[in-house]
Amino acid sequence: MSAIAAAPRLTRRRLIWDRPEIVGPLLIAPAILYIVVLVGLPFLLALYYSVSAYNIFNPSYTFVGLRNFQDVLESEIFRRTLVNTLVFTIGAQVIGLLLGKIGAMLLMQEFPGRRIARALVVLPWAVPVSLATLAWLWMFDSLYSVINWTLAAAGLIDPANRPQWLGRQDLAMIAVTVVHAWRLFPFGVVIFLAGFTSVPKDVLDAATVDGAGFWRRNYQIILPMILPIVLIALIFGTVFTFTDLSVVYLLTKGGPINSTQVLGSLAFQVGILSGDVAHGAAICLFLFPFLLVAVIVLLRVLRRREN
Amino acid sequence: MAAVAANEIRKQFGDVVAVDGISLAVRDGEFLVLLGPSGCGKTTFLRIIAGLERPTSGEILIGGEVVNDIPPRARGVAMVFQGYGLYPHLTVANNIAFPLRTQGTPRPEIKRKVAWAAALLGIDHLLHRRPRQLSGGERQRVALARAIVRDPTVFLLDEPLSNLDAKLRASARSELKRFQQTVRTSTIYVTHDQVEAMGMGDRIAVIDHGKLRQIGTPTEIYDDPADEFVASFLGTPPMNLIERDDGLLGFRPEHFLPREMLDGSELAELPFRIDRMEYLGSERILYGALDGIAAKREVTAKLPAHVPLAGIRAGEWHPFAVRKTELRFFDRNGRRTADRQGRDR
C-alpha cells in the first residue's frame, strides 16, 4: 500500500504502451507498409505490364499473354545477358567471400593499427557506389589506367600493348566482376570476423593439441562451425548481386557489345531508356524464379544444419 | 623416469609474470594436482606443458626429452579443457576419432580404438549424437575418451569438473580418479578446489602468484604446510594463525577443542571467547577471539556436532586447548620454522 502511495505522480491509467496487443502491430506496421508499397505493388505492376503491349509511345493496355516472354527468350542478347548475370553473380561471390575470409584472418591477428585497419576495411561499403565506380573507371581508363601503369612498371605487360580493360569483351566482364567483389568484400570480412570470434577458444586449443595444423583447423573445425553464418552472407550477397545494375551501368553500360549486360541493366535499358515497358517487365521477372530457388535452397540447408 | 619435468619455467605477458620459476617433476603414472587460487598461473603452466604457450624461459621435458620447440601435436599430450572443447559439428564418434585422423591412423584401427574408449567410459550408446545433445557429465566423458584414444604420455586436465553441478561433481570426481587408476597414465590436474585436490591427488602442488609454494601428498600439505599461504589456503575453515614476537603460531580448527575433551599434559591452554556458532549438520564451527592474543583473523574451532556443548555459549569465555604436537610455527616471512616439539621439516 505504501509503495503505491509513494508514487503519486505516476499515472495509474492503462496507457497504449501497456497493451502489447496494440503496441506490437503498431510497431511492425511500417515494415509491412514498406514491403507492400515498395516491393509488393511494383511486383504486381511488373506482372501486369509483362503480359501487355504497354510502351511509352502507346500507353493503352492490350493483353498479349506470354508473348513478351517468348520474345525475350528468343533474343540472342537476353540469353547472353542471362549467362553474364550468372557469371557476374557467382564470380563476385566467390572472389568477395574468399577475400573476405583472408581479410578477416589478417584482422584477427594482433598488429599495431589493427583498429584503424578494421575501420578502413568497411570503406568500399560506405562509399556511395557512384563515387567508387567513378574511381574504378579512372583506374581502368584506356590511357591513364593506374593498373596498367603499375603492371607495365613491374614489367608484367608490354607498355606499347596495354590491355583495354573496358574495351575488350572478356576483360570488361572481369573488370565489372572485380569491382563488385570489391564492394562485397567488407561484408565478407565482417561476416567472417563475427564467425571467427564466435568459435570458442577451448575448441581451437583442443584441435591444436589433437594435432590439427593450420589447414585442418581452418577447414575441418572453423569453417564447418561458421558455415551457417557464411551461408546467410551468401544469400544476401547473391540477391544483391543478381539484382544489381549500378556497377555495370556506371562502368560499361552493358558494353562492349552487351558483353557485360546483366538482367538489371538490360531491363533498365529496354524498359526505361527505350520505353518498352512490357518487355522490360518481362526481363525483370526472370530474376524472380532464380532468386526464389536460390533462397529456398539456402534456407533449407540452414534449417537442416540447425537440427 | 619422470613423465613430465619442468625446469625453472617462467612466463611473462608484458609486465605481468604469470609463472615465476616453477620446477617440478611428475612421476610415471602419478596423479598430480596443481592447486591454487584463480589467477595464480596454474592454467598458464599447464598450457605451457601442452605447448599452447611458449615459456619465456625454462625447459619442459616430456618422457625425458626437451619439448620446448616441439609443437603440441608431437608432444604426446592430451588435454581436457574447462569447457571440454568438443567439436560441435561432429558426432561423438567423430570427436573421439579426430586426434587419430590427424595422425593418419588407418580406418579399422580408428574404429577399434573409438569403440574401446567409448566402452571404457560407458558412452557407446551416444556415439551418433552431437555434443549439443549431451548432458554436462556425458560431454566430460566424451572429452576424456577423445584424450585417451591417442595413448598419451600425459593427461592434462584443466578444471574439468567446474562446469558440472555440485551433485554430479562428486560422482564425476571418483569416476575420474578410478579411470586414471585403470589407465595409469600420468596426469596433471588443475583446480582451485581443495576438495578435488585432496580427494584425487597422489600429490598436490600448491601454486600462488606464479610460484610453487609446496609439493607433497595431501597429508603432507595439510598437516605440514610449508608456509603461511599453504596453511591458510587449505582447510575449511583454514588454519588459525596467531601472532607472536618472532612470527606466527598455527593450529587447525579441528585441533582446537574444549579443555575438558583433551587429556594428557602436553597441552597449550588458550581461553576462548565464543562470539557466534554455526551448526553445519555434521559439525559446529565456533568463531571467537583469544584472551590478550592478536590473531591474523577470527579464530575458529571445529567440533563434531555430536559433542555436547556443555557450558559453551556465545558471548562467554571457555577454556580451550591444543595438543602441542599440533602446533605449527612460521617466521616473520611466513616460512615454516622448526616446531618446538621436534617435528622438524
Image (cartoon, rainbow, N blue to C red):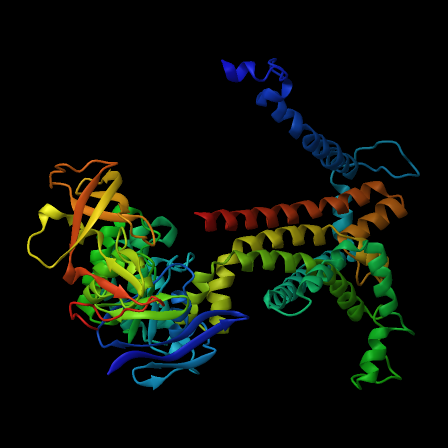
Residue plotted at (37% across, 72% down): B101
The reply, left or right, for residue A53 in relation to residue B305 is: right
| Image coordinates for residue A161, horizontal then vertical, percent | 87, 82
- Image spot of residue B308 (x, y percent): 11, 38
Above-or-below relation of B253 to A215: above
Compare residues A9 and A115 and report the one nearer the observer.
A9
**Residue B1, horizontal then vertical, whole percent:** 24, 83
Q: Nearer the viewer, residue B75 or B265?
A: B265
Along the line of sight, the residue nearer the viewer: B180 or A99:
B180
Residue B146 picture quarter: bottom left
The total number of labels drawn is: 0
Does residue A176 appear to the left or right of B322 in the view shown?
Answer: right
Q: Can see residue B331?
A: yes
Query: x%, y% of residue B207?
Result: 35, 66
Q: Is residue B120 visible?
A: no
Placement of B255 over or under A149, stated as above or below: above
Which residue occupies the extreme left position in the image?
Answer: B264
Q: Is residue A121 left or right of residue B167?
A: right
**Toward the viewer: B53 or B218?**
B218
- At a point 59% along the width and 65% down the height, the residue shown is A108
Q: Is residue B25 above or below residue A249?
A: below
Q: Name the quadrant containing residue B114.
A: bottom left
Q: Would residue B125 be found to the left or right of residue A259 on screen?
A: left
Name the residue at 78% across, 50% down. Answer: A264
